[in-house]
Image (tube, grey):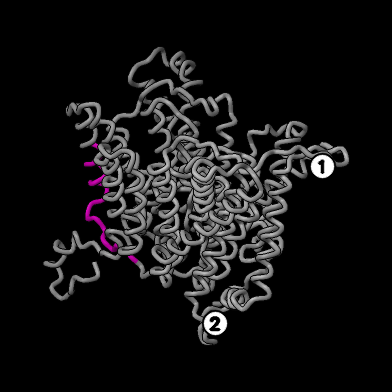
């Protein structure tokens, strides 16, 4: 995609501090703020969608590879982590002497991580052959893989097949969701502002030129893809232990489209915009609940109108200058534009 | 052996449907280098227009199942979908003619979703029974039993393919289409109005999809607004299989896919592949062709100009 680079040059002054603040805030909120169950559900869904959208943004926005199969990796993470807690949970609790906070936490975190790794592995398997393709072909290949994953799950009776699988424990809380979301954003933002990030952007802007100057485009594409799949897998695990019941239909092409719309609405390659879009597009269906039957019609019309009027998304092309005002005083000669 | 031929016939019948839809994909890709995700839903619109037209003709004009009814419904649906395709192209794709390909791709997805869900709103999400347009006759030949419907599907497909070849190879419009797929700029320099040709291509593809919708509903007379999703994706795979942009390739790809799918369903148990994997056949074929010969079976490798 040959649009001008939307590199956000902003470097948060204290990135690790922001991360810590986010984690602690979510812990406090989770412990002390009593939300009614409906709002809890929406808030957790927002968090999960943030993880999905920010990770997909890494592939679609920064690396410029159009992947339509993200839901497949979410599905792998969901089912693998559910399998671990359901089939391994009893054994684990036996070893650690019962269900206490420590054993539950370690089981949950372990399941999430293994789910994420399984998804990352799948990302590697899918990515290495597919990422040789360009544009439309890559989109269809990833779509195809996503559907293959779904069909395989549908045919795996051990995990319930089409009937669905009941997850043994609801372990996801606002704390876990937003901590993971914070970590995802932290990793993605730091990655993008590093040498790897330059690699991604080079691949996105002009792959042929990148190859010509010796950038290993496949390596960068695969890294972006595998990392995105990892986070999608973890999001899947969080989702599984929140909803409590998994069906293959919930991870279909439609789900991938929902995440893509968030990335596009937010402006591909703009993490802040994508987060904003994830929040917006999670709340929107709730707001539209009174007109439930027309929800998808409105959604699709919005998509078309968005593409016709503002294809770069809400925040595409905007350069964030949040911390420019902090730095302006230090250097009066700087014109403060390229923040 | 006769069972094998039977399965082959079923496969060709299924493959004809895929071929007709795939032709639309491939023609639009040829002239616009763009994958029209909404094409599968034009197939659905064709089936539904046949449902309403056929229903009206049967109840209000008292027509009975006959070849005449089939022909009228077929032509009616094709005309309606041609208009629908032209409208979609005019409203959603033409303004984006110079936009990056990704934008148009997303718009196509949007149009597809719009057609599916407004179909659900207007037609109702419940499955509808397609009227029987022609009485079923069992026929026997050389130890094989088949219905006249399967023959009709094959026959109509052959007729449409011949018609399409005639248009593409022997008419001026067809020549303009082929020229446009080579080089759009040179085309307009030659005095061809690109917009007209593109609209014509869309209309032609939509007409074929409508025919596919009617023919498919003959054999599987239950229609829903979401029926175009899976056949649309499979037809796209068929188009890629044959070489996207290549018209005979799309037909070939469709037939191969139809036969492969039927064979897996019919004989899958012998190689430990349960028939429920039928949808995966298309995607496995897709991955295989993209890995080994991305330009498709009949496609020529595209040299990328820097």
Residue span colored magenta: A6-24
Foreground residue among A258 and B184: B184
- Mark 2 = which residue? B187
Magenta-span inclusion, residue A15: yes
Front-most of B89 and B124?
B124
Quadrant of the snapshot with the N terminus of chain A:
bottom left
Residue B278 spot, x, y in % from top left: 65, 39
Work out whether B142 lies above or below A9: above
Between A266 and A293, the one nearer to me in the picture = A293
Q: Position of residue A172 (x, y in %)?
A: 34, 29
Tell me the distance, in whole angstroms, between the alpha carbons under discs 2 and 1.
Answer: 46 Å
Indicate which disc, 2 or 1, sits on the residue closer to the N terminus: 1
Position of residue A33 relative to residue B172, above or below, is above
User: Which label sits on residue B5?
Assistant: 1
Vertical relation: A304 (above or below) A2: above
Q: Chain of mark 1?
A: B
Residue B96, percent from left and from top: 40, 68
* Residue depicted at 55% across the width and 33% down the height: A153
Query: Residue B146's x, y, as percent?
Result: 77, 39
């Amino acid at each position: 995609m040959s649009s001008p680079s939307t590199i956000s040059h902003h470097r948060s002054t204290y990135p690790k501090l922001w991360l810590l603040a986010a984690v602690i805030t979510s812990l406090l909120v989770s412990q002390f703020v009593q939300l009614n169950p409906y709002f809890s559900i929406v808030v957790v869904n927002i968090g999960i969608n943030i993880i999905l959208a920010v990770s997909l943004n890494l592939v679609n926005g920064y690396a410029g590879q159009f992947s339509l199969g993200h839901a497949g990796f979410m599905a792998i993470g969901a089912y693998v982590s559910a399998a671990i807690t359901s089939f391994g949970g009893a054994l684990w609790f036996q070893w650690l002497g019962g269900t206490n906070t420590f054993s539950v936490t370690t089981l949950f975190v372990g399941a999430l991580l293994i789910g994420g790794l399984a998804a990352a592995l799948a990302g590697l398997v899918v990515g290495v052959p597919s990422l040789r393709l360009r544009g439309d072909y890559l989109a269809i290949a990833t779509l195809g893989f996503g559907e293959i994953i779904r069909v395989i799950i549908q045919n795996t009776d051990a995990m319930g097949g089409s009937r669905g699988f009941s997850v043994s424990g609801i372990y996801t809380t606002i704390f876990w969701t937003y901590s993971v979301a914070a970590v995802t954003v932290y990793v993605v933002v730091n990655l993008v502002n590093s040498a790897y990030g330059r690699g991604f952007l080079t691949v996105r802007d002009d792959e042929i030129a990148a190859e010509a100057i010796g950038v290993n485009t496949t390596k960068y594409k695969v890294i972006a893809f595998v990392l995105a799949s990892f986070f999608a897998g973890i999001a899947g695990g969080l989702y599984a232990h929140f909803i409590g019941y998994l069906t293959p239909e919930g991870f279909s092409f439609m789900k991938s489209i929902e995440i893509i719309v968030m990335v596009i609405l937010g402006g591909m390659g703009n993490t802040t915009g994508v987060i904003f879009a994830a929040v917006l597009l999670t709340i929107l269906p709730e707001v539209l609940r009174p007109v439930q039957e027309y929800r998808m019609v409105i959604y699709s019309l919005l998509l078309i109108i968005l593409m016709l009027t503002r294809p770069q998304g809400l925040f595409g092309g905007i350069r964030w200058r949040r911390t420019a005002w902090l730095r302006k005083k230090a250097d009066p000669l700087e014109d403060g534009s390229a923040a | 052996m006769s069972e094998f031929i039977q399965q082959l016939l079923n496969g060709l019948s299924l493959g004809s449907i895929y071929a007709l839809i795939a032709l639309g994909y491939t023609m639009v890709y040829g002239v616009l280098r763009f994958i029209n995700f909404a094409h599968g839903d034009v197939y659905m619109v064709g089936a539904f227009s046949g449902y309403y037209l056929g229903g009206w003709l049967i109840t209000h004009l008292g027509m009975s199942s006959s070849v005449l009814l089939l022909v009228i419904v077929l032509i009616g649906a094709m005309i309606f979908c041609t208009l629908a395709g032209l409208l979609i192209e005019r409203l959603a794709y033409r303004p984006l003619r110079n936009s990056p390909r990704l934008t148009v791709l997303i718009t196509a997805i949007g149009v597809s979703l719009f057609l599916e869900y407004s179909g659900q709103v207007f037609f109702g999400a419940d499955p509808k029974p397609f009227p029987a347009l022609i009485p079923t006759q069992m026929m026997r030949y050389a130890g094989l039993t088949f219905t006249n419907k399967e023959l009709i599907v094959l026959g109509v497909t052959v007729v449409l393919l011949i018609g399409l070849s005639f248009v593409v190879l022997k008419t001026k419009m067809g020549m303009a289409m082929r020229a446009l797929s080579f080089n759009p700029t040179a085309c307009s320099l030659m005095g061809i109005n690109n917009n007209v040709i593109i609209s014509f291509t869309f209309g032609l593809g939509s007409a074929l999809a409508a025919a596919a919708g009617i023919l498919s509903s003959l054999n599987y007379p239950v229609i829903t607004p979401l029926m175009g999703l899976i056949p649309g994706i499979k037809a796209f795979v068929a188009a890629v299989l044959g070489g996207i942009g290549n018209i005979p390739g799309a037909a070939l790809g469709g037939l191969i896919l139809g036969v492969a799918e039927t064979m897996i369903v019919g004989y899958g148990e012998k190689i430990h592949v349960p028939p429920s994997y039928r949808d995966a056949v298309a995607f496995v074929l897709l991955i295989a062709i993209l890995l080994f010969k991305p330009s498709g079976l009949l496609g020529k490798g595209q040299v990328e100009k820097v």
